[in-house]
Amino acid sequence: MDSMIVLENNLPTEVGISVDGAHNLNESYWGLVDGSTAIAEQVTSLFWVSRVAGITDGEVFTFKAETEVGGTTIALLVQLTGTLLGSDIQIAVQAGTAKCDWSGDKDVSLCFTGNDGKSYRVSGAYVSEGAQYDNVRFTVSHAILPQIKHMVVLMLENRSFDNLLGWLYDDDTPECYIPTTTAHEFNGLTEGAHTNSNPMIRNGAPVPAIKGTTDWPARDKTVNASCVPDPDPGEEFSRCQTQIGENMGGFLTDYLLSISRDDGEPDSAAQIMQCYAPEQVPVITSLSKHFAVSDAWHASVPSQTWPNRAFAQGGASAGHVNNDGWPWDMPTIFDVLDSQGLEWRVYNNSVLPSLTKTMFFGKYGTNVTNFSDMGDFQRACQTGDLPVFSFLEPSFGPYEPDESYHPPYDVTPGEAFLGKIYGMLAASPARDDILFVVLFDEHGGTYDHVPPPPAPQPFPAATDGSNFKFDLFGVRVPAIVISSYTGPKTVFRSDTDVPYDHTSVLATLRDWLGLSDAFRKRLPSPRIATAPTLDAVLNLAEPRSNWPALDVVPAHADLAAKPAPTDDVPLNDNQKAILMAVAAHVAKRPLTLPEKWAAEQRLQNHRDARTWLAAMAPHLPVK
């Protein structure tokens, strides 16, 4: 069997290639394939090497493919060492006088500045194509984020930008705007400037967005200020249409439906207009001010969790607008990284299955290699041996406290979890090599004053009968970029007509890792193709000396004092799906459609969840 050596040229121009083979190696063990030119934005096969027995045990042969990029000579290096049964292979890359170490199992990469003054990346990876031996794919591309070796994304739940950060700069001002040509004014809330009204609430008087949440009376309990809004607002596509209608004037009317279903007083719907003061959410406030926050990052879809997470992981949602049709089957960024031999992990803070595994159960249900817990993530931070891409998930409940910020759960555990993850990364020896992005998947029905803008086309219409063509972004959500190369009190927006949304994570991964060809083949989403990347947000030439300590992080003792959800608290769609995924893991097969219908009926509240999990307890923990 052979290993094929290919070059993916992601530059807009072709490059010449010369291959210097091991001339004293019999040509039955290697050979040229294509010509002497690597065409722009295509993959060119360079040469093959035989891996079968025949090379003397311990004998070494080196192959070098040379080209010129930006006026700098680069070398793509392959080395064969004979063994008793075949040969071992190693790869390395060189740009000018800079050369990486040889690697026999991991990817290699170099960023360099060409003689033309532009930044480039040359890399190499082992790629399995179903053969006995791995092939080698070298890549040359323009480089963004040359300082970064690891990208970490934490996606939290169901809060709008205004709900958590609308008052971020109420008594302060940012120090830097990106791009500098945009308005130097933070697009948050202003006292009395933004209102909703409904004739059934406060006799139709305008209800303003106010600074700070308060306790609310609710039937036989009091809604704590840190749990507002309660009950859970609507997040389905149809309800989002009501909320964003009349120039973002429908939040109060829509939330009245949730209050009515909960047998609450109509006036208590006014809590949807309350937005957290900075001192109520000190962790996310501190991070937003210590690093960079966007006041113009939109969810990808004006709807629920799953379609938005699917856009974050695949640039589309397989035609789904709501959390329906579990499990989903569509290409994802994880498939792209696998195809390139690049390491990725999904880390979740629960003994229950991760939400990513739940959503894509048919694809990843039996994958134990790439799904880990936060203990593994902490150890990776401590050693600095993080994957190329890490996707983090909090606990969504109901087995552990919900840490996702999802209403109507207390925001305090979410604050503690976010602070804990930040602390792990800040203490890592790889800190200066990390790009950490904190996102919320969707607004979850909470108030925001900025209408969603149109989104790029084309997309097929939704499969649920709504005829939605994915031509509208969702509501703004918090988005924070944390890096040693990002200055404090930075506010960033897109420098094009297309705003930031969750596919900006994918566009950044594409250009950072030089994967244009792989994206064209596996993730050809028009959203990814037009999404702005995050390279401009790393606006410092030299790394900061440290990541600042946070102002306040909730203590474990404070969290232990928080009461667990009562039996009658309804389960949200995420929790129901994760509980069904537990049953599928225990059964070692996907649930049938009748089984899913039956489970949907059984799983209504936290009492049902506890009963369900008690039956599964002998089989936990399940990752």
Image (cartoon, helix red, strand yellow):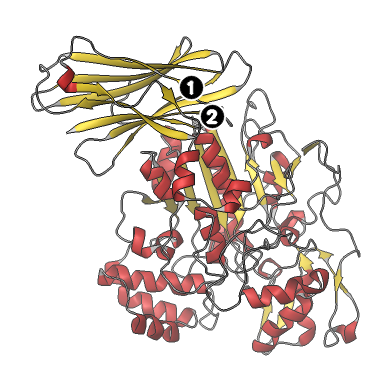
**Quarter of the rendering containing residue 460:** bottom right
Crowdedness near tag 2: few (<14), some (14–19) or many (≥20) residues, C-alpha within 10 Å: many
Picture layout, residue 505 above or below residue 122: below
Tally of numbered discs = 2
Q: Between residue 527 and residue 421, name the one nearer to us.
A: 527
Q: Between residue 90 and residue 205, name the one nearer to us.
A: 90
For mark 2, give the secondary structure.
loop
Q: Amino acid at mark 2?
A: Leu
Specify whether residue 204 is in view. Answer: yes
In the drawing, does residue 59 fall left or right of residue 152? left
Crowdedness near tag 1: few (<14), some (14–19) or many (≥20) residues, C-alpha within 10 Å: some
Pointer 2 residue: 11
Pointer 1 residue: 15
Residue 10 in percent (x, y) is at: 50, 32
**Quarter of the rendering containing residue 270:** bottom right
Residue 98 in percent (x, y) is at: 46, 13
Identify the disc placed on residue 582: none
Picture layout, residue 97 above or below residue 353: above
- At horizontal 77% and vertical 63% (from top left) the residue drawn is 451
Q: Between residue 590 and residue 372, name the one nearer to us.
A: 590
Q: CA distance from mark 2 to mark 1?
A: 9 Å
Circles 2 and 1 in contact, beta carbons < 8 Å: yes
For mark 1, give the secondary structure.
strand
**Quarter of the rendering containing residue 147:** top right
Q: Quadrant of the N terminus?
A: top left
- At horizontal 33% and vertical 73% (from top left) the residue drawn is 583
In the drawing, does residue 86 fall left or right of residue 119? left
